[in-house]
Image (spheres, helix red, strand yellow):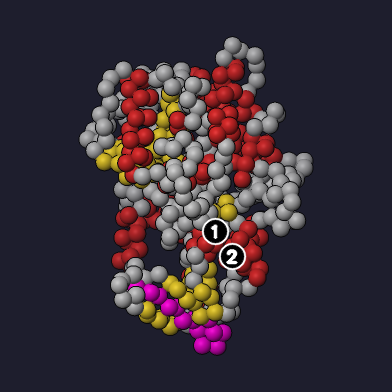
Amino acid sequence: IIHGVQGNPIMGLAQKLGLPYKQSTMNMRVIRPDGSVLPLETMLKFASRAFGTFFEWLPAISQEGADVPAESESVADRMFSKDSPLYGEGDSETREEEMEMARNSARAFQGWTGAPLDYVSLKWWSFGQDTTGGDAVLVDGYRPIIQWLTSKVQQLGAVITLESPVTDITTDEENGVSITVSAETESRQTVNYEADYAVVTLPLGVLKYSPPTFDPPLPIRRLMSIEKLGFGLLNKVVLIYDSAWWAGLGAGGSEGEGDETGEVAVNILLPSKEDPTRLLGPSRGRPSGKHAPLPGEFPVRSPEYLKKNPNSLMIFNVHSQGGIPALAIFMGGEWGDRMELCSEEETKEWADKVVKDYFGKSLMKSIPSPTKVIRTTWRTDKYAHGSYSYIPVTPEDGDGKGASPIDQLELSRTLWGRLFWAGEHTELNQFASVHGAWTSGVREAEKVLVKLEGV
């Protein structure tokens, strides 16, 4: 997905390369545990409040309000406050149900932030000036862009080496940079690369939890910024079918109420009161057996908390956007962490049963099993340790050492005149996005060109 097509460099590149894309309508359908679909009018009202609160009201409170939020105040504190527009107004018979739906669905926004909402700073929410406009979906994904970029750099004589983790980065202000890599083979052969300049694009998770050895050591202010910023998580469980058996079911539960294909892009499954933790993943939001904490893993909630704070589950209709008969379940933040600690078989069984239960009741027919299930595991990936960055809330006992956009700027600063830094975590305005990563790379490339040209 390309978020915010206006001024988005990825959108401009896709158009330049002639890549097929679709404007994303992001229309949705909300399904109750009994399979009934929320009436279209009710769904539109509910969606408007949830998205409006998250993407409009909270940014206005944070950046344009009469008071600056405290560093200890989280997005969740204000999102679920009594004066939040999330709950709407009135005393209708369905108000309690509507409020519960709003709370459950708003908690699922941690798929957007990469972290639970009570971990995300309200003070810095929407501080950056990101791209605007609607979203678009690249029909063939990002692979064509990667292939094009690979071809371009290789034409210029560049060599791309895979499966060779960087172990040491030595910088000499007079002589340049030396990079040591260790091949992932039985011999563990090491290779040194010498250059005048180097651009470090290691993910924030790697810098936090398994960095290479820097010589000289990174300055203390750089280390503090790396430590303070948060690194969140968004995993996906993709169920691939022989055909899109759900095609044609519209937003209100009948035919033809979706986009031009008659489909909706997003399905929201509501949790049940009888089984409130079912949608939190194969292990219901709790650890699956004993395990050592993963680097960056969010702390485990108590069983009491999980029952009192259920989440809705978002399922993206890949077929409506790219033509592939697949559904993608989004597992953000802490639920992504819990899912990674379950086996692939447990994850497949859970996802299959949830889809069959909710959609089977809704369509009143038997749902086929997927032919293939693919899941991402970004937290346990030693070359990532997560998905993208966020600015965390400062604990009340944080001694004024909370994270801020200054830390993102710090991570973008060149060190010793030789070592340049790129990555989404270095982009104040566009962090946590593909276009942010791209923008940071262009930014640093321009700096290097200035050095090489001696301007």
x then y, percent, for residue 328: 37, 39
User: Would residue 180 be counted in the magenta stretch?
Assistant: yes
x then y, percent, for residue 316: 39, 36
SS state under label 1: helix
Residue furthest to the left in view is: 242
Residue 304 seen in the figure: yes
SS state under label 2: helix
Q: Earlier in the sequence, mark 1 or mark 2?
A: 2
Which quarter of the picture shows residue 97? top right
Q: 343 or 102, which is in the foreground?
A: 343
Residue furthest to the front in view is: 290
Residue furthest to the top in view is: 93
Q: 169 or 262, which is in the foreground?
A: 169
Give me the residue at 61% from left, 61% from top: 227
Give me the residue at 47% from left, 56% from top: 385
Asked if 260 appears above or below 112 in the picture, the reply is above
Q: Which residue is disc 2 drawn over? A: 411
Crowdedness of circle 2 by 10 Å Cα count: few (<14), some, many (20+)? Answer: many
Q: How many marks?
A: 2
Q: Which residue is disc 1 drawn over? A: 425
Residue furthest to the right in view is: 66
Q: What residue span does the magenta drawing correspond to? A: 171-183
Side of 228 where 445 appears, left or right: left
Asked if 115 appears above or below 411 in the picture, the reply is above
Q: Are marks 1 and 2 in contact (CB under 8 Å)?
A: yes
Quarter the N terminus occupies: top left
Q: Main secondary structure of the magenta part?
A: strand
Give me the residue at 63% from left, 58% from top: 228
